[in-house]
Image (spheres, rainbow, N blue to C red):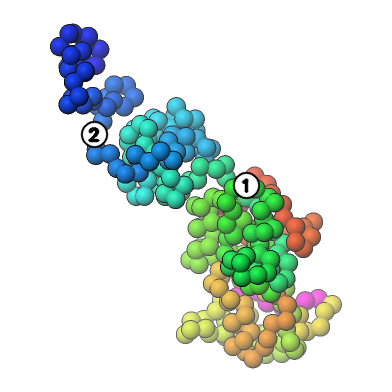
Amino acid sequence: MSRNDNSPERKQSGRQGGSRKKSYARGNAPVKQRKTTALEKQEDGMRLNKYIANAGICSRRDADIYIASGNVTVNGEIITEMGYKVKLTDEVKFDGRNITPDKPEYFVLNKPKGVFVTGSINKGGLTVMDIMAKASKSKLDPVGKLDTQTTGLLVFTNDGGLAKKLANPKNGIRQIYHIKLNRTLSQSDLEKIRDGGVHLEGKKVNVTEVSYVKDRPKSEVGMELVSTKAHIVQKIFKSLGYEIVNLDRVVFGGLTKKDLPRGRFRTLTKQEIINLGNL
């Protein structure tokens, strides 16, 4: 029966409590009926089209079209219904990419020494989240980790897709560290690191470059590598019998500490964001 049928029989049927109206997608095409979930009934949820629009993908009107076309999933399930509601804890993907209801934001911090990257503030001590609270009202997460005593570049974003990509050890990101050891690094150990002679957990550690820092004691070295494995630099030198006194990450991807004092952060430029996404 046509949606525009105004016959008395149609009107009478519409007033009966036991009847159900058909749902229509854009263009009056019928969509598959599905049992309403508990999530849809929650009053504190956000309409899916608004969620997508807030993420900066497109307008709400266009979001409805993409939803009806099956471009959006919530917690792994394709959603095609108009008015579907989601919570901030749900995983929403648009064309397979994670999105958040906040406008994506990207920052880089020059982390000071003695500041925690993870852990609760209730345990005492300053955390990087205390510093970044001044940057945005959105929930920002650090990309990767730095030890409490390690200083240098740390990226923050609410873009879950990019954060996951950058933190994936399989991808690898160019990083350069300035390392100060408790004693002089011997030439033989320097060459051993450079030539891939260091093995951790039965696997060879590949280092792009390692050298003494110019005009500094030979206990200070610079190291470039692409591994994002936790504590990789510390493990390399510990395996050779050295202790790290100071560890500073001076390059991350294409980002440097230029004009960024210790303890300060800045917003990434559009080009820097593009470059990180292409890594």
Q: Position of residue 172 (x, y in %)?
A: 54, 65
Instruction: Locate the N terminus by quadrant.
Output: top left
Q: Position of residue 155 (x, y in %)?
A: 63, 58
Count neighbours of disc 2 (C-alpha within 10 A) and say few if under 14, some if 14 to 19, many if 20 or more.
Answer: few
> Label 2, on which residue?
32
Horizontally, residue 80 falls left or right of residue 136, namely left
Q: Point out the residue furthest to the left here.
A: 9
Count neighbours of disc 1 (C-alpha within 10 A) and say few if under 14, some if 14 to 19, many if 20 or more.
Answer: few
Can residue 71 be seen from the camera position used here? no
Taking the spot 50% from the left edge, 58% from the top edge, the residue there is: 164
Horizontally, residue 181 falls left or right of residue 50, namely right
Taking the spot 69% from the left edge, 58% from the top edge, the residue there is: 131
Q: Position of residue 71 (x, y in %)?
A: 37, 39
- Three-letter amino acid code of the residue under disc 1: Lys
In front of the other: 88 or 57: 88
Instruction: Locate the C terminus by quadrant.
Output: bottom right
Label 2 secondary element: loop
Q: Point out the residue furthest to the right here.
A: 215
Mark 1 vs mark 2, foreground winner is 1
> Label 1, on which residue?
137
Label 1 secondary element: loop
Q: Where is residue 107 in the image (x, y as percent from the top left)?
A: 66, 52
Q: What stretch is highlighted in magenta?
A: 207-214
- Three-letter amino acid code of the residue under disc 2: Lys
Taking the spot 69% from the left edge, 82% from the top edge, the residue there is: 244
Can residue 170 be seen from the camera position used here? yes
Residue 38 quadrant: top left
